[in-house]
Amino acid sequence: MPGEDRALQTAEDELLVARFQAGDAEAFSRLMAIHTDQVFGLAWSVLHDREAALDATQEVFIKLYVALPRFGGAANLPAWLYRVCLNHCIDVKRRSRGVNAELTEEEWERLQGPDHEDPCRSVQNAELRDAIRRAVDGLPPRQRMAFVLRHYQFMSLKEVADVMGCTVGAIKSHLARATAHLRDSLSDYVDPAVEEVDKNVWMRQDS
Amino acid sequence: MFGCGRIADLLGAYVYGDLTSEEMRKVEQHTESCAACARDLKSRERAVALVPNELPKLSDEEKQRIMWTVSGAVRPREQREAPRISVWSLAKAAAVTVIVVVAFVTGANYGQRSVEPKVIVKEVPQQQAPAQTQLGPENTADPELDSGPAETIDKPVAVPRRTIASDSFRRDRLRETYRRNRARRNTVRENAPAIDGADTSTGQDASTERDALLRPDFPSSGVNLPSLESSFPSLGPSFPNWKDPIKQSSEKLLAAPGSDAQTPNQSVSEQPDAEQPEQIQAPEKP
């Protein structure tokens, strides 16, 4: 989000939070309308499960509702939402690790919504698709957080650092390690010695 | 001259174009001469390019469903249906947890009470208690994000569909959380003087005043839990037909002069049930 949009959004958030604290319940609905998409996007990018992401989004806003009367930092509402969402999603993943650690292709299909909105569907090569999924799922928690926030949410390093509560330098390290992990997991497909690794793969990316 | 190790630490951010121009120059200089790092960078770029970054869109239906579920979960207690949980002890534990949680929210809604702070946003200079939230371990001011067990808001009704947790798991969590909240309340009371953002002194004076007014009237009882009726009106002041029973009756009792912002506190604390949080504080005062 460019700087101006962000400033406007912050002003609107502050206004809505103030109104809610003064007793206006509509303000909360408006806050939900503004931020639900991004929170859902973040939850999905961690969980890769549409239903679980919907549940997570609900939990995040319920927590917001309870915390809002005492909320002092309206200027950072998105950061607060992201932080709570990440906390919750990482925890859900940790709890469920024993349950669905290895998903077959059919199970994965079933978990997606009725429109099968798996973004990896654009990748035609099934093996590659699996490899990508496993590579991203295999990222350790902190690296996954940094990666998800930068790669899917397009947040600046400063914003990611705000959400995760560490320095920009630490985020750079997280990204370095995350990309190293991806490079190693996808080593079959990213070998730089091969000039045209698999031209079909790259071309199909655009579909 | 940068070594390969230090360069490697910058390569991730380089791929995303997030380095300062100084750092970018260093990386480019190094990779010109170091073939290994050049290869490393290329593989990382390809790996990142392989991961699609489109997110699924939320349909209007789903968005509506989320908003309805959230508003249903936070409706006032009187309007809720009977709990639909088959295990009675789970329902009891859940209800108790919700009461405890909402009691503090109610206290917080009255604004100036010395209730332990809720989830703290880092930027606000509030008094921090050692245990920062009683809503469970989502310590959002805590830089360690990947720690802590599950959330504690488990509602007895309108429960969003759980895909992961089992009943016994949740029951254990609730018990654990209830115990932890009790312990936290006792430690936090003494450390949480102020309620309003920056105005600590007013908070202190007000609570001293209140205590001076109230201490002789306190029934001494070890029970920490506030009672159901008075402390559980709702989670929000603007629901239709919501009458604040405590505020109404206590405003009659306390026609205190000069009670502007302090009135709600003094009013609330007149009620024996809502005084329960106060009791915990009272013994700690000298």
Image (cartoon, coloured by chain):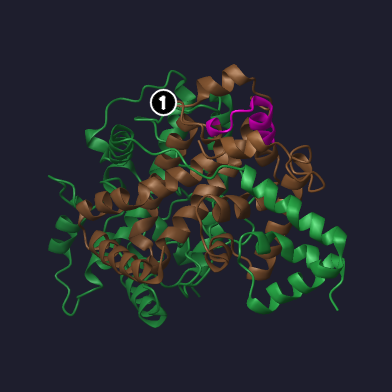
Q: In which quadrant of the rendered view does residue B154 lie?
A: top left
Report the chain shown in brown.
A
* Secondary structure of the residue carrying numbered label 1: loop
Which range of residues does the magenta coloring cover?
A121-134
Identity of the residue drawn at 51% across and 36% down: A119
Report the chain shown in green.
B
Q: Nearer the viewer, residue B99 or A177?
A: A177
Residue linked to disc 1: A115
Secondary structure of the magenta portion, mostly? helix
Residue A54, position as x, y percentages in the image: 42, 35
Identity of the residue drawn at 72% across and 52% down: B44
Whether A132 is among the magenta residues is yes
Q: Amino acid at mark 1?
A: Asp
Residue B183, position as x, y percentages in the image: 57, 52
In this view, B55 is above or below B38: above
Q: Quadrant of the N terminus of chain B?
A: bottom right
In this view, A175 is above or below A118: below
Q: Chain of mark 1?
A: A
State how many labels appear. 1
Residue A132, position as x, y percentages in the image: 66, 36
Q: Residues within 10 Å of mark 1 (few under 14, many from 20)?
A: few
Residue A94 in view here: no
